[in-house]
Amino acid sequence: MLIVCLLICHAAGALGSVFTFTAIPLWYSTLILPSFAPPNWIFGPVWTLLYTLMGVALFMVWRTRGGSVEKGRSRKFGLWFFGIQLALNALWSILFFGLQNPLYGLIDIVLLLISILITLIYFARVNKKASYLLIPYLLWVAFATALNGMIVLLN
C-alpha cells in the first residue's frame, strides 16, 4: 500500500509536469520574475521530495485504524482533503503553465494552501508524525503562493 500511496502522489506531479516542461523555455522564461525566484533546476528535486513525503503521510493515515469515533471522522475528512489538495496541486500546473495564466494559478494555489492546512490539521488528529511530513509541503506552497502572487503583479 505504501507503493500505491507514493504512486498516487507522484502521478499528480507527473500530470503537472506535462504542462510545465514545455512552458518553461517558451513562456515562463519570458516572464518578469521577483528577485526571490529560485533557479528552475531546484523545482524538480524539491517536488520529488515533497511528493514522496506526501505519499508516506498518506500511507500513515490510511493504515491507521481504530480509535475513537472522532479519530475515525478525522481520518475520513483528512483523506478527503488530501485528495482535494492533490487535485488542486495538479490543477495549478494546468492553469499556470498550461493556460499560461498566473492569475488563475494564484486563485488555485491559495485554495491549495488552505486545503493543505486543513489536511495537516486532520492528519494531526489521526497521526502526528504524518502531519509533520506535510509541513515542508505547506511551507513550500506558501513560498510558491508568494512567488505566484508577485508574478501576477509584475506581469
Image: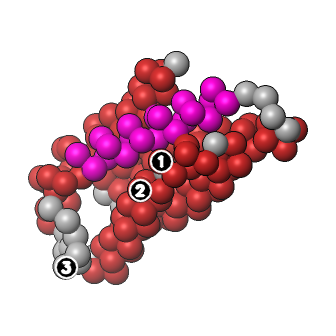
- For residue 135, say whether it is visible: yes
Amino acid at the residue labelled 2: Pro
Q: What whole-number distance in Å separates the C-alpha atoms at marks 2 and 1? A: 7 Å
In the image, 18: left or right of 64? left
Q: Which residue is mark 1?
A: 133
| x and y percentages locating residue 113 in the rendered image | 52, 61
Q: Which residue is mark 2?
A: 136
Q: Secondary structure at mark 3?
A: loop
Part of the protein shown in magenta: 45-64
Q: Residue at x 33, y 70 (%)?
A: 147
Reply yes or no: does residue 50 show up in magenta: yes
- For marks 3 and 2, give the CA distance: 22 Å
Q: Are marks 2 and 1 in contact (CB under 8 Å)?
A: yes
Q: Nearer the viewer, mark 3 or mark 2?
A: 2
Tag shown at residue 8: none
Q: Earlier in the sequence, mark 3 or mark 2?
A: 3
Quadrant containing the C terminus is bottom left
